[in-house]
Image: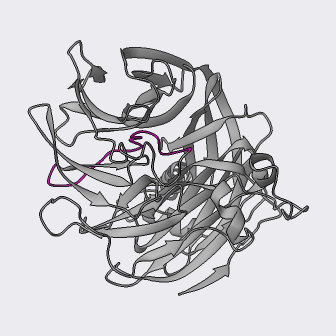
Amino acid sequence: MSSSWHLHDMSDVGHGSSAGVSGHGLICISSFSVARAPPTTISSLRLIRLVHAMAHRLLLSGDRKTFTTVNFDAEKKSLTVLADYTAPPDVSWVEPTSSSGDVDRLVGLSEQTGEGELFTFDIDHGRKTCSFTSKKKTLGAPAHFITLHDESALALATYLGGSIALYPVSITEEQGLLLVDAPRTELLFEFTYRSAGHGPVEERQRQSHAHQVLEDKRGLLYVPDLGTDRVWIVNHRNLQLEVVGWLQCPPGTGPRHAVFSPDEKLLYVLGELSHNVIAFDLSPPPALNMQPVDGFSASVVPPTVAPHHRYRLDSSEITANPAVPRVLYASNRWELHLAEREPHLRDVPEKKQPGDAIAILLLSPDGRRVEDVQFVRTHLDTIRGMRVSDDGKHVVVCGQEGGGIEIYRIGGRRGEEWTLAARLADGLESGIKHAVWLG
């Protein structure tokens, strides 16, 4: 396995050429009959469809007072702020649920340590309004949620105290998804290091810290737990929860987030504390103490960080590419703050990097080995959010402490080539932790 650096930087961001436009145009008008339509109609249809294909709206949120909607024009390689809306405190995760015309319906969580909150809201881009439609209080520091496949509830992972909870919902065409007035079901996870009082990373592993929840096509839930070095496997039936097994990570891994392989036979887990990716085989039935795939482990730390400085980094996001089956992207944060986070370190390079780095992991055909690791250097300070577009052509990356957001175009035969398409920092409130594509 080798490591290499790869970065295409566009110095004329916002003034790029229209390369690739004709391809989009042909795809967009393929359903229309050229023989029957007059030339002016064809041109109009092509322009309308092309503009739609090239323009994308995104929503930004985080430890800030507002939601911000931005427009990304892929042809012009530009990002512009559309609107700001008053937001609850520290909205660190948002997911779209449906859209109708100019209205997007979404679910978000407010990551407050005392008492968190789940809420639903609508953004009307035409009227530039944001309205909150339902909400439910949670335990402190909710971290991540999904809508269950059967659409009966939201499943929420709570960081402090370490739990997963189901919040019943209703879904109608008129109002979309709403939280209903019904009690939640909650499952607290065992703290596996209780006898010692803490895990191998003492300051971070003093209790269970459920960080994410995923659901496979069988309906099983997987919950990475940073505090216990486990990914819990949970069955849910009739809004009841039961642990039916766990994936056992090496001590000190601190599993934060995970992602399935396209066929869901493998789960790739990112260790926030160990800064590596490990894999688990999900083909066998759920069981206790399931071990990682032998020989699959890849560091996501860039070579600019010395081995004895790595424990002051935090790994953050891991994601796959929906259009390319054997590639993973994993982000790092805090490289620009090593000296601040550990003042006694005396050999931290005086010249800082322009921003945090993202690791690109290229996998073997069966997904059970890492063949290569490459790195992209951003201009973002403390990467927290990273989201690939549904078509796999672009990825948005957010800087929590500075740098705003950057969007890269993804290319290459294996999804390994990232070209900076647009960057936006001016006019954005800091504290951005999350971004989602709206269309």
- Position of residue 191 relative to residue 99, above or below, is below
Range shown magenta: 203-219
Q: Residue at x 50, y 74 (%)?
A: 298
Q: Is residue 324 positioned above or below 387 on the image?
A: below
Q: State which quadrant residue 401 falls in.
A: top right
264 within the magenta span? no
Above or below — where is 125 with respect to 276? above
Q: Quadrant of residue 147?
A: top left
Q: Residue furthest top?
A: 181
Number of numbered discs visible in the structure rendering:
0
Residue at left offset 44%, top offset 65%: 321
Q: Nearer the viewer, residue 122 or 265?
A: 265
Q: Measured from the top left, where is residue 300 in percent x and y?
A: 57, 68
Give the residue at the far right of this rendering.
Answer: 350
**In front here: 220 or 146?**
220
Q: Is residue 337 above or below residue 416?
A: above
How far across and down, in percent of the image, does residue 260 sit? 32, 62
Q: Quadrant of residue 310?
A: bottom right
**Would residue 100 appear left or right of 288 to someone viewing this image?**
right
Residue 65 spot, x, y in % from top left? 65, 21
Q: Say if the magenta span includes residue 214.
A: yes
What type of secondary structure mainly makes up the magenta span? loop
> Could you tell me residue 296's position as x and y percent?
40, 78
Q: Residue furthest front?
A: 195
- Choose between 396 and 183: the one closer to the eye: 183
Does residue 353 appear anywhere in the picture? Answer: yes
| Residue under the image location 39 percent in, 84 percent down | 364
Residue at point 32%, 53% (across, down): 231
